[in-house]
C-alpha cells in the first residue's frame, strides 16, 4: 500500500513539474492531501486485520471521539 501511495504521489509531483507548477506550498499541500486520500482508500478497500485490532483498542478509550472512530473502523473492517 505504501509503495502504491508513493508511486502515485511521485507521479503527481512529476505531473505538476511538467505543467510548470513549481510552487513549494502547492506541491506540498496537494501531495499530502493526495497521499492521504490514496492511502485511506487503499486501507479501507483491503481491510487489513490491523483495523479490527485498532477498533478494539479505541473502544476502550474514555474519549467519545475515539469510540466513534472505533465504530467506524469496526464497520469498515467488517463489523463485530
Image: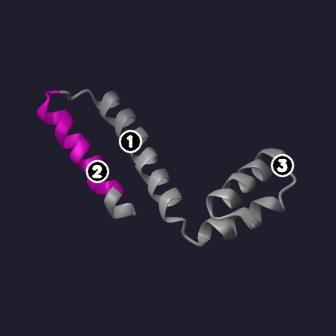
Please give the name of the residue rendered at 30% of the width and 47% of the height, measured from the top-left corner.
Answer: 9
Q: Position of residue 50 (x, y in %)?
A: 60, 70
Mark 2 element type: helix
Is residue 6 magenta-colored? yes
Query: Closer to the N terminus: mark 1 or mark 3?
Result: 1
- Compared to 26, does 62 lie above or below? below
Q: How many marks?
A: 3
Say if mark 3 contacts mark 2, CB within 8 Å.
no
Report, in whole angstroms, how far the alpha carbon at label 3 lies from the one at label 2.
Answer: 35 Å
Q: Position of residue 27 (x, y in %)?
A: 30, 34
Please give the name of the residue rendered at 23% of the width and 41% of the height, measured from the top-left corner.
Answer: 13
- Compared to 5, does 12 lie above or below? above
Direction from residue 35 to residue 21 in the image, left or right:
left
Residue identifier under label 1: 34
Report, in whole angstroms, how far the alpha carbon at label 1 lies from the one at label 3.
Answer: 29 Å
The residue carrying pointer 2 sits among few (fewer than 14), some (14 to 19) or many (20 or more) residues within 10 Å by Cα, namely some
Mark 3 element type: loop
Report, in whole angstroms, how far the alpha carbon at label 1 lies from the one at label 2.
Answer: 8 Å
The residue stretch that appears in magenta:
5-20
Say if mark 1 contacts mark 2, CB within 8 Å.
yes
Residue nearest the viewer, comparing 46 with 18: 46
Which circle marks residue 63 in the picture? 3
Location of residue 76 by image quarter: bottom right
Q: Position of residue 49 (x, y in %)?
A: 59, 73
Location of residue 1 by image quarter: bottom left
Query: Closer to the N terminus: mark 3 or mark 2?
Result: 2
Mark 1 element type: helix
Residue identifier under label 2: 8
Residue nearest the viewer, comparing 67 with 63: 67
Amino acid at each position: 500500500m505504501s509503495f502504491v501511495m508513493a508511486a502515485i504521489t511521485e507521479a503527481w509531483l512529476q505531473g505538476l513539474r511538467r505543467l510548470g507548477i513549481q510552487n513549494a506550498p502547492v506541491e506540498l499541500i496537494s501531495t499530502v492531501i493526495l497521499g492521504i486520500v490514496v492511502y485511506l482508500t487503499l486501507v479501507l478497500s483491503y481491510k487489513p486485520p490491523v483495523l479490527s485490532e485498532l477498533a478494539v483498542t479505541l473502544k476502550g478509550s474514555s474519549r467519545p471521539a475515539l469510540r466513534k472512530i472505533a465504530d467506524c473502523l469496526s464497520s469498515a473492517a467488517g463489523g463485530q
